[in-house]
Amino acid sequence: MKLEKFFRKTYQKLRRIIERKFPSEKSEELLYLLETARRLFEVGDEKSSVFFLKVVVEAIPGFKITIKRRRTGKGDRGDLR
């Protein structure tokens, strides 16, 4: 549930930033990557969708995102935060 809320908020922020700040040619490419991330997330492939989000974020100067994994004592079953 936390990941879904994080993804939705980040997706909306990135979409607004891209539509405002980039020329049409570059914004089309970034919006395509963002839509791909959204589709992957809807299908249930969280890791790939977060990877695509990171790619889009790296293309935007001054925007940074941190994704932490929660560690438990029960092996590596952490989820993305």
Image (cartoon, rainbow, N blue to C red):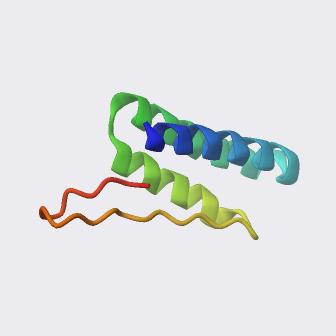
Which part of the image, by quadrant, shows the N terminus?
A: top left
> Is residue 47 positioned above or below 62 on the image?
above
Question: Which residue is pictured at 65% across the width and 49% down the height?
Answer: 30
Tell me where residue 65 appears, x and y as whole percent. 59, 64
Q: How many numbered markers are drawn?
A: 0
Q: Say which of 67 and 61 sits in front.
A: 67
Q: Residue at x 62, y 60 (%)?
A: 57
Q: Residue furthest front?
A: 73
53 relative position to 40: left or right: right
Camera-side residue: 2 or 41? 2
- Could you tell whether 59 is left or right of 43 in the image? right
Q: In the rendering, at what x and y percent does residue 10 appear?
A: 62, 47
Between residues 54 and 77, which one lies in front from this camera angle?
A: 77
Please identify the quadrant where the C terminus is shown.
Answer: bottom left
- Of all residues, the one furthest to the left in this rendering is 74
What residue do we see at 81% from left, 43% from top? 19
Q: Left or right: where does residue 11 sit relative to residue 42? A: right
- Reply above or below: 8 against 65: above
Please say whether residue 36 is visible from this viewpoint. Answer: no
Name the residue at the bottom extreme: 62
| Quadrant of the image occupied by residue 58 | bottom right
Can see residue 65?
yes
Instruction: Name the residue rendered at 74%, 52% in the picture.
Output: 26
Measured as percent of width and height from the top left, residue 78 is found at: 27, 58
Residue 31 in the image, given as x and y percentages of width and height: 65, 42
